Image (tube, rainbow, N blue to C red):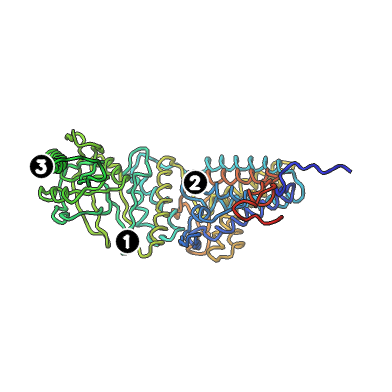
């Protein structure tokens, strides 16, 4: 008898063949089940408590999967596609996971009957390519030259995104706010130019959009109360300079022989500070912002001269102020000239909830804006911020790609019908597999029905009949427990969301199907290698 050849380290876990593919598929379905109920306007929210005891309440597929600590290697693929969908388009993270899970579920019986995974993969790739092509054919282009029409399109897309979130009741209020915010940005639509500040207290409707920069009042010293809190057309100095006295012991060792010498050193130090302050005052700046602290002497000096100052301003706030008001951040005070100072029409400090906020409005180069969100609980405001992030991403996408399709399961039913018809025209195994994908696409409308507590079979039969007779924008209407033409009902989504979701889901499914063996190396110290597990003072006899 041949001796057994040991190739891998002892304790290595390896499993292969058909059972391995089936177990990977089951793991992915478990992930899909985790977010299944969050889909759509009637979706439920998940409360996830992490290891530090912090609770996150969320409805966003990507947030839920990021917060879950997934260890199964194949199931991590689904977490990754949810993240990529979130980064690329912002919305549709739940649908992408559901689609991938359903594609795999439809493939499971074929894998068990020993259909070669590569046959499945080829059919899936073909179906995905056909679907994307079909979306491009039937999506409806919007005229960009009419600003009011484009604006209403963007608001509808934002409202569709928000309708499945916690803030669904105020979706019209927030949709307008988001579109307003995005239209304030420049051509590149940079996300970091939309600042979001959260203030607890008040109602959601108290949230406001500021066309300019707003940040929380910084830590301030005595004398701050004397400063005016309201300016019209002020000049703004942005500094990265410390305006306070340093204690000598930190900075230098000085040997002195007499009191006079010591006095002259102290005087010199004060003189340096006052020279800096005089330079700032003479430059004509009325508002002084610095990243580093501004001490009490400086605060009082500015107050006497009717100037406003704020020290320890967060870096991103300072950068946004620079973008909005012009000017540049100075690291020394030697050459403060008109050219490096910013300006805005109005600066004021106002009370928002329990906080005071510094607000710059009417900025000349204003390519930035700030959303101040209000709400009861902290988790609630955070969820609002995530929802608005999704809506902002969607509006950005819709601005760049002007094709839209109807949501609410309409486009999925149309693709399902298209693939089913196509599968009947080809022979061979692909016919079965493509019609299996056509069936998998129905998961979206089916899940929308189940989450709303409708009879899914009944509604899907109605939808199939409508789509077969050529009404291609019919989808689930959650409000009336029936089907409706979702294009007329203004449930619109950018086509790019659906294209991205389909390609990502199909790729993930192909990836998981083409894996037939998992080899997991033993963790260090699990006893596999000789001497493992003996370290760190735990040397027990073997």
Q: The residue tagged with tag 2: helix, strand or loop?
A: helix
Q: Residues within 10 Å of mark 2 (few under 14, many from 20)?
A: many
| Nearest the eye: 40 or 388 | 388
Number of marks: 3
Residue 390 spot, x, y in % from top left: 43, 51
- Above/below status of 203 relative to 90: below
Give how far apart the Cα atoms at labels 2 and 1 are: 29 Å
Quarter holding the C terminus? bottom right
Q: The residue tagged with tag 3: helix, strand or loop?
A: helix
The residue wearing badge 3 is 260
> Which label's residue is closer to the chain start, 3 or 2?
3
The residue wearing badge 1 is 205
The residue wearing badge 2 is 497
Q: Is residue 468 visible?
A: no
> Which label's residue is closer to the chain start, 2 or 1?
1
User: Marks 3 and 2: which is nearer the front?
Assistant: 3
Q: Quadrant of residue 350?
A: bottom left
Q: Residues within 10 Å of mark 3 (few under 14, many from 20)?
A: few
Residue 327 spot, x, y in % from top left: 23, 37
> Which label's residue is closer to the chain start, 3 or 1?
1
Q: Quadrant of residue 69?
A: bottom right
């Amino acid at each position: 008898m041949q001796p057994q050849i040991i190739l891998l380290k002892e304790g290595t876990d390896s499993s292969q063949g058909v059972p391995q593919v089936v177990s990977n598929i089951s793991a992915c379905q478990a992930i899909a089940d985790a977010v299944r109920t969050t889909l759509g306007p009637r979706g439920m929210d998940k409360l996830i408590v992490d290891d530090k005891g912090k609770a996150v309440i969320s409805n966003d597929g990507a947030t839920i999967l990021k917060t879950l600590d997934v260890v199964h290697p194949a199931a991590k693929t689904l977490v990754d596609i949810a993240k990529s969908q979130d980064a690329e388009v912002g919305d549709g993270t739940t649908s992408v996971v559901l689609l991938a899970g359903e594609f795999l579920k439809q493939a499971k019986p074929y894998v068990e009957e020993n259909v070669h995974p590569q046959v499945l993969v080829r059919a899936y790739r073909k179906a995905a390519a056909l679907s994307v092509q079909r979306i491009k054919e039937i999506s409806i282009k919007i005229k960009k030259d009419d600003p009011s029409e484009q604006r209403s399109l963007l608001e509808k897309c934002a409202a569709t995104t928000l309708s499945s979130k916690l803030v669904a009741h105020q979706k019209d209020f927030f949709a307008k706010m988001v579109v307003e915010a995005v239209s304030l940005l420049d051509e590149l639509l940079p996300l970091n130019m939309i600042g979001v500040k959260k203030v607890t207290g008040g109602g959601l409707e108290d949230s406001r959009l500021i066309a300019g920069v707003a940040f929380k009042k910084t830590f301030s010293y005595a004398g701050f109360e004397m400063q005016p809190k309201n300016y019209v057309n002020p000049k703004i100095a942005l500094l990265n300079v410390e305006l306070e006295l340093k204690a000598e012991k930190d900075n230098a060792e000085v040997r002195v022989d007499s009191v006079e010498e010591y006095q002259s050193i102290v005087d010199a130090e004060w003189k340096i500070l006052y020279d800096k302050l005089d330079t700032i005052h003479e430059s004509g700046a009325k508002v002084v912002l610095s990243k580093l602290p501004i001490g009490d002497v400086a605060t009082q000096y500015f107050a006497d001269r009717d100037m406003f100052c704020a020290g320890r301003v967060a870096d991103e706030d300072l950068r946004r102020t620079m973008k909005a008001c012009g000017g540049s951040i100075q690291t020394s005070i030697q050459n403060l000239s008109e050219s490096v100072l910013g300006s805005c029409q109005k600066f004021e400090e106002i009370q928002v909830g329990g906080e005071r906020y510094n607000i710059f409005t009417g900025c000349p180069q204003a390519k930035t804006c700030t959303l101040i969100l209000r709400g009861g609980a902290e988790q609630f405001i955070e969820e609002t911020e995530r929802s608005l992030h999704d809506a902002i991403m969607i509006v950005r996408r819709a601005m760049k790609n002007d094709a839209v399709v109807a949501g609410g399961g309409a486009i999925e039913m149309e693709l399902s019908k298209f693939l089913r018809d196509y599968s009947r025209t080809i022979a061979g195994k692909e016919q079965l597999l493509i019609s299996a994908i056509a069936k998998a696409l129905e998961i979206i409308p089916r899940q929308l029905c189940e989450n709303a507590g409708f009879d899914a079979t009944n509604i899907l039969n109605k939808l199939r009949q409508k789509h077969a007779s050529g009404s291609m924008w019919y989808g689930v209407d959650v409000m009336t427990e029936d089907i409706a033409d979702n294009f007329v009902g203004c449930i619109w989504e950018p086509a790019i969301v659906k294209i991205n979701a389909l390609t990502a889901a199909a790729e993930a499914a192909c990836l998981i199907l083409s894996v037939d063996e998992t080899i997991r190396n033993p963790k260090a110290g699990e006893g596999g290698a000789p001497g493992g597990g003996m370290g760190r003072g735990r040397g027990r006899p073997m």
